[in-house]
Image: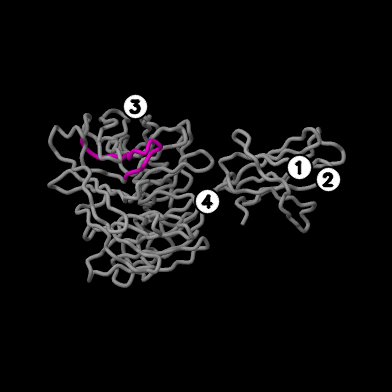
Amino acid sequence: MDNVKLKRAMTIRPRTCPAALAILLLVWIPAWALSQVFQEIYSFSPLGLDGDSPHGGLIQAKDGGFYGTTFYGGTWDYGTLFKMTPSGQITTLASLDATNSDQHPITGLLQASDGNFYCATVAPSRILRLAPNGALSVFGEPGGTVAGDLVQGTDGYIYVADAGDDYNGGFIFRFAPGNGVGELLIQFNYNSNYLSGYRPSGGLMQAADNNFYGVTGAGGAGGYGVVYKLTPSGAYSVMCSFSQGSGNAVNPYGRLLQASDGNFYGVAGGYVAGTIFKMTPDGRLTTFARFNGANGQTPTDGLIEANDGKFYGTTTYYGSNYVNGGTVFRLTADGILTALVSFSGSRGPFPGATPYAGLVQGSDGNLYGTCGTEGTRGGGTIFRIIMPGPLLSFSNAAGEVLLSWPTNYAGYIVQSATSLQPPNWVDSSGSPVVAGSEFRVSLPAAQPSRFFRLKR
């Protein structure tokens, strides 16, 4: 399937081309350059057997399907684990059952290296394992409420941040692959003036230096949370502390992102509607962007960096259409924050509301996410946002045509056609090679006039 939407095509005849060759290069104008392209792929219904109210996000598994969880719905209304095809067909893989006390998934799914899927529940707090054959079992029991999505380290262990309760400040566990034996790595506490932070408020991520990073929503030298580092051997240290101040990021939550620039990015409270912060690898903290209600309020999960080099995420509330709607936002590298979608509830152009989780970029290049409420059937939604494809550029030199596009758009091939009426696209004989930040394909110039396009 083409990963671009054709809104207008142009033919370009560069002056440097020899007379024997006319390059007819399709200039693809992405649909969202004209208007936002939003698709409600699936809508759940309240108390539906297929699920109700997804609280976690989606993952794209090794088989190409999307997998997720719902907090309610299913046979006993205690939640479901499901699979969705890219076209939006839902299959319920498991309905949670009160008879074995497994109720209400609070996270999305993790597909581990063993092929099994894992998620956390809140009533009680457990880690469930779903085998590819559909068998559901208890994998581990952290004790308190799991603070964010599970992550598998390069050592094979599954790492869990636990927010704790009124009697303790939280924990970090890891569970051995296969048998699920748990190991307590860190216990947060309320002593030492809370300088080490307490109450983890997001899951862990493993960075390029092989260490794990996460956030707490409270404690630290400033009193409003910390970013911490945890080595694979269990050594804990505070990278930076959040402090109150005009417009400052405070009380961080959600998973951190280490971007292609090497810095860490995350979401937090502060500035009334919420903030996005940046931390350098040596722990220097800055408030990078601020929400104002119109572009969303209360981001509750981490960011992703898409293949266009920009950051994307969700907010749970506000936007321009509905107080309890929330947004999908885009953040540029220079800190410009824009709402791409303002959810509109059960009606309107963007059905859905209160996205509790962040986004995932699918193998097709598009963004996928969930809304916890509303939608056309009223029980939450799964949505897709069409992303623009890469721009194909060309030049002519030494009897060759050089076609190029950015290397952050992998998996594309060049196709050509001599006419668009009807189109008859054939794969190019040239193979892409990497040159700096571009993919390049060189083709002989002495051929008839042709149209070119990229296809994924």
Q: Position of residue 81 (x, y in %)?
A: 36, 64
Mark 1 vs mark 4, CA separation in Å: 30 Å
Q: Residues within 10 Å of mark 3 (few under 14, many from 20)?
A: few
- Looking at the rendered structure, which numbered label has been put on residue 366? 4
Mark 3 vs mark 4, CA separation in Å: 33 Å
Mark 4 vs mark 2, CA separation in Å: 35 Å
Q: Earlier in the sequence, mark 1 or mark 4?
A: 4
Q: Which residue is mark 3?
A: 284
Q: Earlier in the sequence, mark 2 or mark 3?
A: 3
Find out whether the residues at labels 1 and 2 contact each other: C-beta distance under 8 Å: yes
Q: Which span is picked out in magenta?
A: 204-219
Q: Which residue is mark 1?
A: 443
Mark 3 vs mark 1, CA separation in Å: 48 Å
Q: Nearer the viewer, residue 232 or 338?
A: 232
Q: Earlier in the sequence, mark 3 or mark 4?
A: 3
Q: Which residue is mark 2?
A: 447
| Quarter of the rendering containing residue 329 | top left
Q: Position of residue 387 (x, y in %)?
A: 55, 48
| Quarter of the rendering containing residue 335 | top left
Q: Earlier in the sequence, mark 3 or mark 1?
A: 3
Quadrant in which the N terminus appears: bottom right
